[in-house]
Image (tube, rainbow, N blue to C red):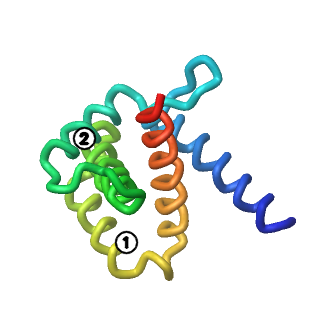
Amino acid sequence: MSEEDKRVEQAASAIEDLLYMGAIRIQNDRALLSPQFSLVASNLTESMEKKGETPEEVMKLMYYSLLIFMNEYLRVPKAFTMALGNDMEQHRNSMESGALVTTYVAVLSEIWSQNKKA
């Protein structure tokens, strides 16, 4: 399997997971952030100094939005969500879950950016 095939498979798996979590939805052959995830991201954007203008800011916005979404809508306990976030920030490259979350954030960032342009 080529690296490109592996990336496509990871993105497809992330999209499936994000659909299952309710963070995104498909409408008219387009991926959209769900209303709940959009609300979290919008509220977070308002409270952040940097408003998600650069790709790095968008990635950070989507990362924090995903953690908040997991706590508020998926009912993942706050202590666990905070611990996961702390572990991700310190050990992301050595954690299998780090690769998953990074792919989720990349997919969410792409959807955010594409919908912002539309």
The quarter of the displayed image where residue 10 is located: bottom right
Q: Nearer the viewer, residue 114 or 109?
A: 114
> Relative to 82, is 105 above or below?
above
For residue 30, above or below residue 73: above
Residue 70 location, x and y as percent? 33, 46
Number of disc labels? 2
**In the rendered structure, which amino acid carries the disc numbered 2?**
Glu
Which residue is at the far top? Answer: 28
Q: Position of residue 6 (x, y in %)?
A: 75, 62
**Residue 18 shown left or right of residue 86 in the figure:** right
Which disc number belongs to residue 44? none
Q: Is residue 109 visible?
A: yes
Nearer the N terminus, badge 1 or badge 2?
2
What residue appears at the point 43 percent right and 37 percent down from the top-left corner?
Answer: 23
Foreground of the two, 23 or 72: 23
Please state the horizontal and vertical placement of residue 97, each as a whole percent of the image: 49, 66
Task: Inspect the image, locate mark 1, and give the three-letter code of the amino acid beneath it.
Answer: Met
Residue 22 visible to the viewer = no
Q: Which residue is mark 1?
A: 88
Q: Within 10 Å of the Cα at label 1, are there few (<14), some (14-19), or many (20+) other Cα atoms?
A: some
Q: Position of residue 11 (x, y in %)?
A: 64, 51
The residue that disc 2 covers is: 72
SS label for mark 1: helix
Taking 78 as reference, is 110 above or below it? above
Gap between marks 1 and 2 measured at Cα: 19 Å
Q: Position of 117 compared to 85: left or right?
A: right
Kind of element beneath mark 2: helix
Please report the residue visible at 59 percent of the width from the left and 27 percent of the height from the top.
30
